[in-house]
Image (cartoon, rainbow, N blue to C red):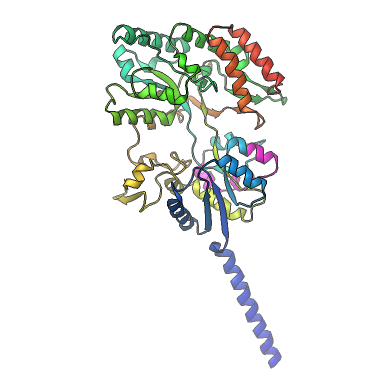
Amino acid sequence: MNKKRMIVGLLILLMISLGVFAQGQVDKSTVEVKVLAGVTGGKDEAENKLFEEEMEKATGLNITWEKVPSGYDQVLMQKLGAGEQYDLIYLNQFQMYTLAKQGALTDLTDRIQNSKVYAENVDKAELEKIGLNGKYYAGFNKLEVFPLVNVNKAITDKVGINLDSLDTLDEYYQMLKEVKTYMETKEGKKPYYPFFTYMPDIWDLQPWFSSVGLRRGVFVDASGKKYAPYVSTKAKPVWEWLAKLYKEGLMDPASFTGKTGDMRSKMWQSQDIVMDVDWAAWTGLYNNNARTAGTYPAKVNVVGLPGTKGPDGTYMLEQGGASLWAIPSNAKNPDEAFEILEYMATKEGGLLLSAGIEGHDYTMKNGKIEYTEVGKSHAKDHGAPFPISTQFDLSLLGEMNPGVLESVAIGQRSDVEVAPMGYANGELDTRKYYDIMSKWMTDCIMGKISADAAINGAEKELRANKLID
């Protein structure tokens, strides 16, 4: 009898222990998931704690959301180099390439391909942009926007120009000529340089190279050789077009010495330029700044345009390098980390990463967001002003800056192809590429050397530095 009781007691203890074990498997809050974040999270330490709590509520996980206040890239590499363990890390596309090749990141291909959340929320075309040799080593933080042509319609309307008719390099050239003549003769602004393009990083010329079907950067062909489209013979008409703009006073000389901040100031603070190439988000920021200054829309009414149409009828724009989340190969809790990554891809996660924390950044009234004063100051951006989820309706965020939704929508058009610059599968030394291209092409545009000489010189130097084969 005592023996039977002992056996029954052991069975009961075993069942209890199994129950506890099973419960432990379900109770995700017992596991600490460590996240290292850059731009995503709260705006200060106190709000970051609230953000962390919102993430915990949504996922049922116990999360430590460590947000680095400054110098994130350096901190990330220092921590990884020191062997610190994180379950999820924020990184850019180039860092993903580098770390994946070093074996420092978990291969997420199967997880992503089997994820119902990703299947329902993430455009497959976006996934293809971050693939490395057919594999995925990261998921998304947000939908990346793109630089496009921004034109001040308040000026072109006065001149009588139909912006819908601009599709070719020559049509843009004619528009700039007409604006220059009008501003110098009718409004007495002389000299007037209607176009600013930032040349130190050849940033951003992509809308113009679309006319010949070329993209910026270095790519790898089918035979494994690296090549740079901007130094091919097909690129010559665009470099000659830019040189013509400069020669005829249509390009601002400050394009070679100024900063992007100078370009932006000229675009919205006065009528110093009529056109630049800038991020789609800046279409709205230009107009919002002008609205604050009382000049919108009478003097400043910036609209986004897709640039020039390519030989196949497609407008080719350049997407910004993706903002991503990866799971380090030494992560303790990869399954839980992937749950966070999935949540950020949902429309609910997108709302947290954009509008922020309900009850702190905003409240909901009759299905509409009402921002607090704190929320207004955070500009609907807690890491993802444009959420990655295809289910997310941007109108939920309330009034956006004038023109921004229209500019972002350009990237969704069937005749527009948005893709990142060529990173040569993560092997490109981008700084060296920019420096070489800028040096030769600045001389070309300023008329110091011919387009042929600039292309040949840049190609030889790129090859000498092993940037191309």
Residue drawn at the location 63% of the way across and 42% of the way down:
77
Quarter of the image with the C terminus is top right
Total numbered badges shown on the rendered structure: 0
Name the residue nearer the viewer: 358 or 311.
358
Is residue 283 visible in this depiction of the protein? yes
Image position of 61 with respect to 40: above or below: below
Residue drawn at the location 50% of the way across and 17% of the way down:
256
Name, please, the residue furthest toward the bottom: 1
Residue drawn at the location 41% of the way across and 15% of the way down:
166
The percent position of residue 393, horizontal first and vertical second, equals: 39, 41
The percent position of residue 224, horizontal first and vertical second, equals: 72, 26
On the image, which quarter does residue 305 sit in?
A: top left
Image position of 54 with respect to 379: above or below: below
Quarter of the image with the N terminus is bottom right
Name the residue nearer the viewer: 223 or 281.
281
Image position of 244 with respect to 340: above or below: above
Residue drawn at the location 69% of the way across and 15% of the way down:
460
- Magenta region, residue range: 96-122
Name the residue nearer the viewer: 13 or 301.
301
The percent position of residue 238, horizontal first and vertical second, equals: 53, 12
The percent position of residue 192, horizontal first and vertical second, equals: 37, 11
On screen, residue 318 versus residue 82, left or right, reads left
On the image, which quarter does residue 148 sit in?
A: top left
Image position of 18 with respect to 85: above or below: below
- Is 20 in the magenta? no
Is residue 396 visible in this depiction of the protein? no
Q: Main secondary structure of the magenta part?
A: helix
- Is 101 in the magenta? yes
